[in-house]
Amino acid sequence: MSNTSTGHIKVKSIQDTAAPYGLYTTYITQSDKELKGSVLVLHGMQEHSGRYIQFAEYLASVGFAVLLYDHIGHGNTATDDTAQGYFQQERPQERLINDAIALHHYLKDKHPDHPHFIIGHSMGSFITRCVLQRIGNEFDGSIWIGTGAKTPGAEAFRALLALLQKISPRKRSKLINGIFSKMNNTKFRHEPDFDDTSWLSLSKTNRKRFQEDPLCGIPFTNNAFYTLLTILLTATKKGWQHSIPKSLPILLVSGQDDPIGGFSKGIEKTEKQLKESGFQEVDIITYPKKRHEILQEENSIEVFEAIAQWLLSHAKLHLIQ
C-alpha cells in the first residue's frame, strides 16, 4: 500500500515572505515495493499538486518515491487568496527555479543511492528545462509534459509585462488573462460545449473538476505573467539546449491537440532541436485528439503506464551502470 505524507518544507529562498511556511509538499512511496528511484513532479500554472496524486500513486505502485509540491503563488503554498497567482517582486523566476532545485536536493539526500528523475507539466516543464540547464548532470532522466517551443512575439509581450510588473505587479488584468485564454482556445471556440477550459482537456469531466476546484483557474497577476514569460524565454531561447547534458534521456509527452505544444508542431520542433544538438536519447509520445492536460484525460492510465515504463527502463539502466 502507498504511504503518503504532507507538509511544508522550508527552502533557502531569495524572499521567504512568498512562502513563509515553506513549500507545501506531498511525498508518496509504496512500502511493499523495492525502491527504483525518486521522481520530482512540477505542476503547471493556475493549478496545484493535488491534481497529480493519482499519477504519483501510480508511479509509487511500480517502485518510485514521488515528491509533489505547490509552487509559490499556488495551492497550499499560497498563504491566502491574495497570494494566489502572485510570485514575488524580486527575481521571481529565480525563485521558481531554485525551489525546484532545493526539493530535488531534498530527494537526493533522502535517496542518495538511487536514480533521480524530474517531470514537469506545462509551466512546470519550462521550469524543469531551466533546472536542467543548471544541474542537468544530477538527473538520470527527465519528462516534459505539455511543453512546447518558443512562442512568436514572446519577447515583445514580456517587455510590456516587465513594465506592468513594476507599475502594478499585483493587478489581475482581465485583458491579459483574456488574451491568454483566447489564444489557447482559438481552435475550439466553435465547439457546441465550448468554455474557457476547452483547451485544457477533451474530457468534460476533467474540465468540470478544474472549474469546481477553488485552487484552480485563479487569474494570474501581472507579476505572474511576467514570470511565466521570463521562464518560457529562458527555456526556449536560441541555444537553450546546449547547457543540458547530451547524455540525459528525455521523454516528451503531449496531446496532439495541445495548443501549448503548437498542435504537435512545437513539441516536434523541440524534439528536432535536441536531436540535432546531439542528444543521445530523445523519445516522444503524442496522443491523437487529446489536449493540454494529458495526465487528466480519459485515457490517463494509458499515459501513466507509458511514463512508468520509461522511468523503469531508465532506472534499471542506472542500476546496471
Image (cartoon, rainbow, N blue to C red):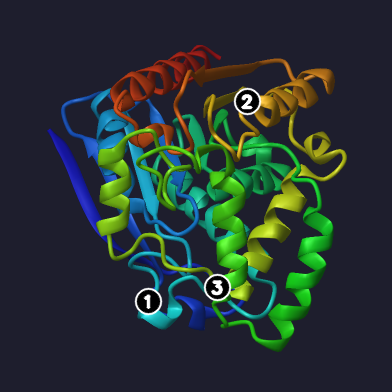
Instruction: Please give the residue where the numbered disc 3 appears in the rendered image.
Output: 174
| Image position of 232 with respect to 217: above or below | above
| Image position of 173 with respect to 296: above or below | below
Instruction: Please give the residue where the numbered disc 1 appears in the rendered image.
Output: 21
Task: Residue at the far bottom: name it.
Answer: 167
Please, what is the three-letter code of the amino acid marked with disc 3? Lys
Q: Nearer the viewer, mark 1 or mark 2?
A: 2
| Image position of 188 with respect to 93: above or below | above
Instruction: Please give the residue where the numbered disc 2 appears in the rendered image.
Output: 264
Rendered-image quadrant of the N terminus? top left
Q: Which badge, 3 or 1, comes first in the chain's sequence?
A: 1
Q: Position of residue 17 (x, y in %)?
A: 50, 83
Closer to us: 257 or 161? 257
Q: Residue at x 74, y 26 (%)?
A: 269
Please, what is the three-letter code of the amino acid marked with disc 2? Ser
Q: Secondary structure at mark 3?
A: helix
Label 3 with label 2: CB-CB less than 8 Å: no
Q: Is residue 95 visible?
A: no
- Quarter residue 267 falls in: top right
Q: Label 1: few (<14), some or many (≥20) within 10 Å?
A: some
Q: Position of residue 9 (x, y in %)?
A: 38, 65
Q: CA distance from mark 3 to mark 2?
A: 29 Å
Label 1 with label 2: CB-CB less than 8 Å: no
Rendered-image quadrant of the C terminus? top right
Please, what is the three-letter code of the amino acid marked with disc 1? Tyr
Task: Residue at the far left: name it.
Answer: 1
Q: Position of residue 229 (x, y in %)?
A: 70, 58
Q: Label 3: few (<14), some or many (≥20) within 10 Å?
A: few
Q: Position of residue 165 (x, y in %)?
A: 69, 79
Q: Residue at x 49, y 70 (%)?
A: 85
- Quarter residue 28 falls in: top left
Q: CA distance from mark 1 to mark 2?
A: 39 Å
